[in-house]
Amino acid sequence: MRVLIVDDEPLVRRALKRVAEMRGHEVVEAENGSQGLEKWKQENPQLVFLDVLMPGLSG
């Protein structure tokens, strides 16, 4: 399963990525809402972890 992680905190992204990869999932990361939207369009993930409080374009 392809998972998209959108969060402005690198430590949060890293922790979620580690857990997802340990379970055999492919992980795509984005550090802000704009980048997350582009990755979502390009990568077609089956699951999205999204921080709803980010600067700029939030979740």
Image: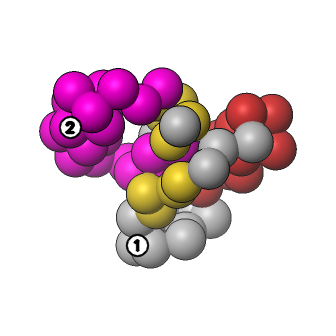
In which quarter of the view is residue 38 placed? top right
Q: Is residue 45 left or right of residue 2?
A: right
The amino acid beneath tag 2 is Val
Q: Residue furthest right?
A: 41
Disc marking residue 53 = 1
Q: Secondary structure at mark 1?
A: loop
| Residue behind mark 2 | 19
Q: Is residue 20 left or right of residue 11?
A: right
**What stretch of residues is rendered in magenta?**
4-26
* Few, some or many residues within 10 Å of mark 1 (<14, 14–19, 20+): few
Foreground: 26 or 7? 26
The amino acid beneath tag 1 is Leu
The reply to whether residue 51 is visible in this rendering is yes
Q: Residue at x 38, y 48 (%)?
A: 8
Give the percent coordinates (x, y) of residue 27.
Answer: 46, 29
Give the percent coordinates (x, y) of residue 29.
Answer: 48, 33
Q: Residue at x 35, y 26 (%)?
A: 24
